[in-house]
């Protein structure tokens, strides 16, 4: 890994020459590949507290879901800009507490995609974020702990009750995952937290395995006064 990092630093000027750094949110020229322009940085809205009203567990969100964070999510999830996972994870990690000394590291469990959605998209954006958070020292990835057994329609545009009905029984712990979850601190990882229907389905499945604690980590959190069309 040290060799790879050295090569990356060595060839960075060449990469910047061929592909001039651009802000992934607005396209403006920036100094380095992994960042945002000053204007876009200034528009990210960081939640004051890690707790989210209406949730029984802590929610560690990097930002509220607004126009700038929406552009980043669109570029990341639907534009195939998977290299953004490092930037988004760093912003999430800044909101998360440090793992407790003397305890096993938290399990970072990504929200699962159905196998057909994974096949069509080519990647699970939540899993990439979980892997990047592991590199930030925030826990240990359990990438396949949850499984979406039933294919569900796109939840965008559905109300809270409709989302709950669609997700009932769709997400469960993978065979053998309960033993790994039992007694561990667990952090559910996703890109965007909207109505919470998906996270509640995941948390319900995890809670059945008796973890020590559960929290949610996400890049953007949708609040009532920050609602936009979710991709």
Image (cartoon, rainbow, N blue to C red):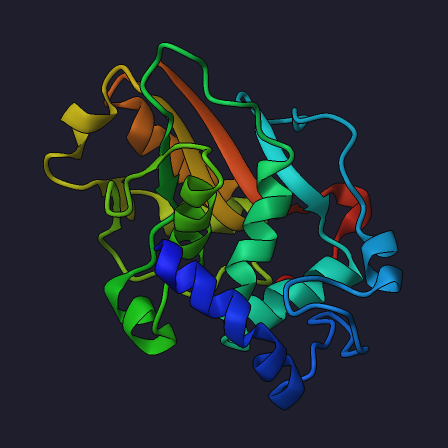
Depth check: give the residue in front, 77 or 114. Answer: 77
Q: Quadrant of the N terminus?
A: bottom left
Depth check: give the residue in front, 190 or 97. Answer: 97
Residue 193 makes an appearance in the image: no
In the visual, does 176 lie left or right of 126?
left
Identify the image quadrant of residue 39: bottom right
Q: Residue furthest left?
A: 176
Depth check: give the residue in front, 175 or 217. Answer: 217
Relative to 60, residue 113 above or below: below
Give x and y (percent) for residue 29: 80, 78
In the visual, does 7 lie left or right of 12?
left
Q: Quadrant of the C terminus?
A: bottom right
In the visual, does 228 lie left or right of 199?
right
- Picture mark count: 0
Please report the residue visible at 81 percent of the width from the left and 56 percent of the height from the top: 41
Give x and y (percent) for residue 207: 32, 23
In the visual, does 145 lie left or right of 58?
left
Give x and y (percent) for residue 178: 18, 28
Relative to 59, residue 184 above or below: above
Q: Residue furthest bottom?
A: 18
Give x and y (percent) for residue 83: 51, 67
Q: Residue furthest top?
A: 102
Relative to 132, residue 200 above or below: above
Residue 179 makes an appearance in the image: yes
Please report the residue visible at 45 percent of the width from the left and 49 percent of the height from the top: 132
Please report the residue visible at 43 percent of the width from the left and 53 percent of the height from the top: 126
């Amino acid at each position: 890994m040290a060799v790879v990092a050295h090569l990356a630093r060595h060839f960075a000027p060449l990469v910047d020459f061929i592909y001039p750094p651009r802000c992934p949110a607005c396209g403006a020229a920036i100094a380095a590949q992994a960042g945002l322009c000053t204007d876009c940085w200034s528009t990210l809205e960081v939640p004051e507290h890690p707790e989210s009203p209406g949730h029984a567990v802590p929610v560690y969100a990097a930002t509220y879901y607004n126009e700038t964070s929406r552009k980043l999510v669109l570029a990341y999830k639907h534009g195939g800009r998977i290299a953004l996972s490092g930037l988004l994870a760093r912003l999430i990690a800044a909101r998360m507490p440090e793992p407790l000394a003397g305890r096993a590291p938290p399990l970072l469990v990504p929200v699962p995609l159905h196998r057909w959605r994974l096949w069509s998209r080519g990647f699970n954006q939540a899993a990439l974020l979980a892997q990047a958070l592991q590199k930030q020292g925030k826990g240990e990835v359990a990438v396949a702990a949850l499984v979406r057994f039933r294919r569900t329609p796109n939840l965008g545009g559905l109300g809270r009750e409709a989302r709950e009905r669609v997700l009932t029984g769709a997400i469960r712990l993978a065979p053998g995952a309960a033993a790994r979850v039992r007694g561990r601190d667990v952090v559910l990882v996703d890109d965007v937290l909207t109505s919470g229907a998906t996270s509640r389905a995941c948390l319900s499945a995890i809670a059945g395995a008796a973890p020590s604690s559960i929290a949610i980590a996400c890049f953007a959190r949708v609040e009532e006064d920050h609602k936009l069309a979710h991709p």
